Amino acid sequence: MTFNRDKKFDIKQTNSIILKKRKPSYTGESWLGHTKDCGIIDHELLKGATKDELIKRSGRELGGVDSHISHLKAEHGLIVSKNNDIYKFEYYHPETNKILNELDLENLMKIDIENVAKYSIVQLKNKEGDLKWYSIGIETQNKNGEEVTSLTENKGFAQKLINKKVGDYVDFGTGFKITKIKKYLSK
């Protein structure tokens, strides 16, 4: 097992993997540094599995599976939920202290908001008419199959977007027009 981990980094990496439509295959070591049976459990928790499935697929006894889940919570700071006997990693955003499942995340992206804010997503149109989604200060899942590019909130481009409204122009590079703003984890 791994100890003395950078919990913020582990949470960020796990969140990023949770948001991907296609989950990675197990190749001998998980993104958390676990190998063999523990690495298999890590990967199974991405899509969700019952305890019996975790035992069968990993080859561990019940106590070993329980111990590893406890380790993931304590040493990695990860959230493992149990819903209808399915154990699964949940998306956790430490700054807002919110735990969101995929449906919660999808529903948040359907809510329009007035101003671009930290933890929101914004669709921009460039001079050629191309549309592209950006997120501010958070990694997000794709929006209706379209890729969302993450921007760190303190980057110049993100700073130019904050507090802008739909229809506003952003003077950055060749210029952009804001076409849509959606809530993500913003207020």
Image (cartoon, rainbow, N blue to C red):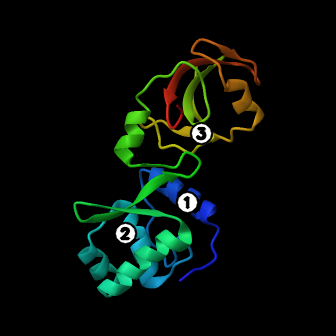
What residue lies at 49% left-to-right and 30% top-to-bottom?
A: 183
Residue bearing the label numbered 1? 11
* SS type, badge 3: strand
Q: Position of residue 175 (x, y in %)?
A: 72, 19
Residue 56 lies left or right of residue 114; in this view the side is: left
Q: Residue furthest top?
A: 167
**114 in relation to 11, above or below:** above
Tell me which amino acid carries mark 3. Answer: Thr
What residue lies at 42% left-to-right and 41% top-to-bottom?
A: 105
* SS type, badge 2: helix
Give the CA separation, mark 3 to mark 2.
27 Å
* SS type, badge 1: helix
Q: Position of residue 74 (x, y in %)?
A: 51, 72
**46 in relation to 173, above or below:** below
**22 in relation to 43, above or below:** above
Between 33 and 22, the one lying in front of the other is 33
Q: Is residue 149 among the parts visible in the rendering? A: yes
What residue lies at 47% left-to-right and 43% top-to-bottom?
A: 141
Give the CA separation, mark 1 to mark 3.
19 Å
Tell me which amino acid carries mark 2. Answer: Glu
**26 in relation to 172, above or below:** below
Return the disc, 1 or 3, that comes first in the chain's sequence.
Answer: 1
Q: Is residue 59 among the parts visible in the rendering? A: no
Q: Position of residue 184 (x, y in %)?
A: 49, 35
Return the disc, 2 or 1, that comes first in the chain's sequence.
Answer: 1
Residue bearing the label numbered 3? 149
Mark 1 neighbour density, 10 Å: few (under 14) some (14–19) many (20 or more):
many
Residue bearing the label numbered 2? 44
- Toward which corner of the image does residue 66 lie, by quadrant? bottom left
Is the Cβ of the residue at disc 2 closer than 8 Å to that at disc 1? Answer: no
